[in-house]
Image: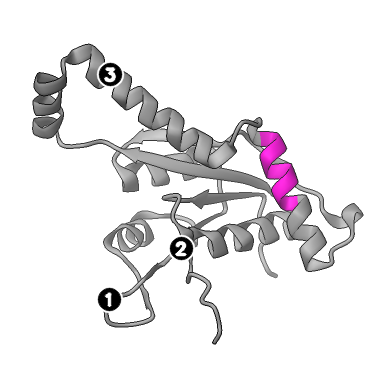
Amino acid sequence: MFKTFKSILFATNLSENCRQAFEVAASMATRYQATLVLLHVLERMPDYIESRLKGLLGEKQYDDLAHSHENTARQALIGKKSSNSLVREALEQFCVEAGIEDASCGYHSREIVVADGELVDEIIAKSKEYNCDVIIMGARDGFLSDNSIGATIKSIMRRSKVPVMMVPPAHDEK
């Protein structure tokens, strides 16, 4: 019997490569009436770089800059709307474009998560925290081939106890 998904983690770095992966995550959330957790991790910089920046900028200016960066990432994910409104509108738009009737567009959503820390650790931790059944991530365009699985996705695949789905970026057909 095929397992249904109750909670889906979509991890994004906010790049264009993640757009196709979001569409897959939204489709699955709609299909399984699952919770869709959108995650962006603000990677911590090495301590020696952070110390140098604090020395150059001053503690207060550095903290202001870091806070501004976090807010910028959050706004890129949710805009000026609440996370539930954004997810609901995105899924509703997806349903319209996919020709799915409104009545079958059932899903649950949690607020969008912006975490701070080591990328792989945070993705694994949030997948456990939200009891996710699958992790969906976007692949990047490769240097020598069409798509590339980077070190981050490989590390997540090694450490995850749930399936990890890599979605290649959409390419315009010419």
Query: Which of pointers 1 and 2 lies earlier in the amino acid sequence?
Result: 2
**For the point 56% across and 48% down, which residue is it?**
132
The extreme top residue here reads 60
Is the residue marked by circle 1 packed among few (<14), some (14-19), or many (20+) residues within 10 Å? few
**For the point 53% across and 72% down, which residue is it?**
170
Amino acid under label 3?
Asp
Disc 3 from disc 1: Cα separation? 36 Å
Secondary element at image label 3: helix
Amino acid under label 1?
Phe
Looking at this view, is 138 or 97 the one in front? 97
Q: Is residue 24 magenta?
A: no
From the image, tell me which residue sits under label 1: 143
The extreme bottom residue here reads 174
* Residue 116 horizontal/vertical position (percent): 35, 33
Secondary element at image label 2: helix
* Residue 40 horizontal/vertical position (percent): 44, 42
Disc 2 from disc 3: Cα separation? 30 Å
In the picture, residue 88 is in which quadrant? Answer: top right
User: Magenta part of the protein: which range?
Assistant: 84-91
* Residue 60 in sight: yes
From the image, tell me which residue sits under label 2: 17
Q: Is residue 85 magenta?
A: yes
From the image, tell me which residue sits under label 3: 63
Is the residue marked by circle 3 packed among few (<14), some (14-19), or many (20+) residues within 10 Å? few
The chief SS type of the magenta part is helix
Which coloring applies here?
one colour
